[in-house]
């Protein structure tokens, strides 16, 4: 008889630079699961819209571009068609544009099927803002990862410097706070902790500690009746 057990999903949501990506990648590697960086999809959509000269305030225009986007995740690289956009989508201008277009219902709908299609055996670790609330409401484990805005700005600063990119702490902190406000205040899929998500505050906690906690929670969730 075919196995009707749904492919397990671990949903990790939280604000910008809360460490979701690093934690989700490590947890996926430990479990041999696939990994979905949903923020990269919003970033790619925003970058494509910017390059096409689209009006970033027009949901329909941006969603049309989003629907036809040929985004490919190849190991740790992200491509739109043949173009490698791995670094380009991390620029602060793209971060802001991504947060802007992510507030549009049609843009979010255009990315929904794409995200769900990545739910493949043996399992998926998905990070974003609405993984537990909208995209995978039946996730076996939902985590809401957060950290203080100052710590998140410092982490982003370190990341950018390591990549040789220019960064200013004060501007980063301001950007993070503006994005938090926009992501939390929007009417569609706002950033919020679901009632059934576990809150993990990672301020001052090293990545390894958070990964261990998530793995332990997953083990417990799998054993739950
Ligand atoms: O996670 P990351 O910072 O890469 O996401 C970029 C932007 O994409 C966020 O500021 C947010 O507005 C949007 N996003 C979203 N829903 C997701 C993932 C990202 O709205 N599931």
Image (tube, rainbow, N blue to C red):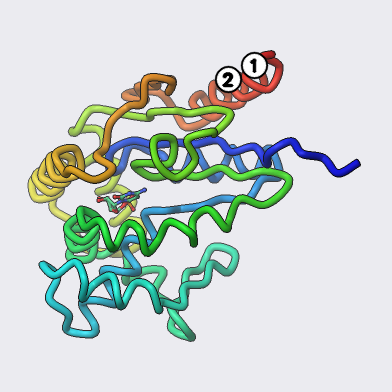
State whether label 2 is within 8 Å of ligand 1: no
- Residue 16: name its quadrant: top left
Indicate the secondary structure of the residue bearing disc 2: helix
Furthest toward the front, the residue is 1
Q: Measure the alpha-carbon separation of dots 1 and 2.
A: 5 Å
The percent coordinates of residue 6 (x first, y second) are 68, 39
- Residue 192: name its quadrant: top left
Q: Which residue is mark 2?
A: 217
Answer whether labels 1 and 2 touch (C-beta < 8 Å).
Answer: yes
Residue 83, relative to residue 208: is it above or below? below
Q: Tell me the quarter of the image containing the N terminus.
A: top right
Q: Which residue is mark 1?
A: 220
Residue at point 12%, 39% (across, down): 181
State whether label 1 is within 8 Å of ligand 1: no
Residue at point 17%, 58% (across, down): 100
Residue 18, relative to residue 161: is it above or below? above
The percent coordinates of residue 67 (x first, y second) are 38, 73
Residue at point 53%, 53% (across, down): 116
Residue 25 or residue 179, whichever sits in front: 179
Mark 2 crowd level (few <14, some 14–19, many ≥20, 10 Å Cα)? some
């Amino acid at each position: 008889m075919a196995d009707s057990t749904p492919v397990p999903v671990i949903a990790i949501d939280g604000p910008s630079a809360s460490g979701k990506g690093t934690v989700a990648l490590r947890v996926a590697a430990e479990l041999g699961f696939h990994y979905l960086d949903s923020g990269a999809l919003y970033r790619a959509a925003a970058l494509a819209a910017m390059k096409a000269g689209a009006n970033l305030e027009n949901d329909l225009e941006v969603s049309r571009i989003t629907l036809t986007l040929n985004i490919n995740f190849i190991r740790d690289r992200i491509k739109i068609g043949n173009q490698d956009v791995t670094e380009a989508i991390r620029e602060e201008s793209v971060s802001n544009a991504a947060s802007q277009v992510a507030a549009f219902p049609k843009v979010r709908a255009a990315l929904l099927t794409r995200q769900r299609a990545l739910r493949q055996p043996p399992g998926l670790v998905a990070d974003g803002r609405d993984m537990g609330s909208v995209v995978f409401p039946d996730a076996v484990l939902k985590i809401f990862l957060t950290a203080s805005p100052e710590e998140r700005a410092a982490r982003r600063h370190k990341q950018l410097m390591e990549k040789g990119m220019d960064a200013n702490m004060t501007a980063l902190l301001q950007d993070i706070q503006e994005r938090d406000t926009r992501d939390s205040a929007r009417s569609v899929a706002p950033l919020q902790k679901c009632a059934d998500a576990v809150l993990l505050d990672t301020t001052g906690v090293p990545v390894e500690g958070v990964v261990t906690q998530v793995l332990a929670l997953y083990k417990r969730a799998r054993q739950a009746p």
